[in-house]
Amino acid sequence: MNKNILSIPQAAEFCSLSRGTIWKYVKTGELKASLTPGRQYRILNKDLELFMREKGMYPFAKYQPASKKILIVDDDSQIQKVLTNVLSAQKYETAVASDGFEAGVKVTEFKPGLIILDLFMPGMDGFEVCKRIKENPLSSQTKILAITGYDTEENKDRIMEAGADGYMAKPFLKDEILQQIEALLNNKKSLTISQKGENKQRATSNEFG
């Protein structure tokens, strides 16, 4: 199924409205929709989001990621443990996933406001996970902070093109990742932090990753 195109029932569920109400908006032209050869209406995700903003509904969609919930997706159990401890100390609620498939389940169940996503994992890699999350209208608003031990311009460009909101190279400082998370959750501009550059001089005792 194309997650960028919704049926009337899917749009209704996303908006927490009845199918009849969505149908009415489509018929009056307030919600843009196209008709398939089988006489079924289809709505583009971008048109639904525009409609919801115009109606003042957008913040109240059914899928509401909680800003204090963070999903850690990394196959390294040590990274999971360290990040969980750091984030819990800052009063964030956390959940972990060890691969892309588990991440997909946790995104639906846990509804995180932000996902810390490793790029290279067994099975589905972080690039595909990011792409799927951002293409799904039920999770497209979730912030994604990509992390990797394979810091290259190619990997950085590729994950940002897939829809990531921020990028950090391992290892990183505790304060750095906390600043990145705060910026993303408050809709502020996030930096892409690589191992290159003068600002990467650090005290190794405070590093992890």
Image (tube, grey):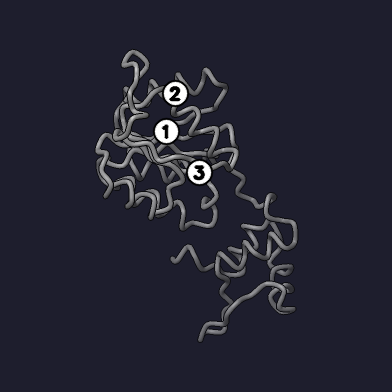
The residues tagged by marks 3 and 1 sit, at their Cα atoms, a distance apart of 12 Å
The residue at the point 51 percent across, 21 percent down is: 88
Q: Are marks 2 and 3 in contact (CB under 8 Å)?
A: no
The residue at the point 43 percent across, 47 percent down is: 164
Q: Classify 10 Å Cα crowding around label 3: few (below 14), some (14-19), many (20 and above).
A: many
Give the residue at mark 3: 143
Is 182 on the left-hand or right-hand side of 125? right
The residue at the point 38 percent across, 54 percent down is: 162
Q: At numbered mark 1, what does the secondary structure look like: helix, strand or loop? A: strand
Q: Are marks 3 and 1 in contact (CB under 8 Å)?
A: no
The residues tagged by marks 1 and 2 sit, at their Cα atoms, a distance apart of 8 Å
Closer to the camera, 6 or 133? Answer: 133
Which mark sits nearer the N-terminus, 2 or 3? 2
Amino acid type of the residue that numbered disc 3 sits on in the rendered structure: Lys
Q: Are marks 1 and 2 in contact (CB under 8 Å)?
A: yes
Q: Classify 10 Å Cα crowding around label 1: few (below 14), some (14-19), many (20 and above).
A: many
Which part of the image, by quadrant, shows the N terminus? bottom left
Q: Classify 10 Å Cα crowding around label 2: few (below 14), some (14-19), many (20 and above).
A: many
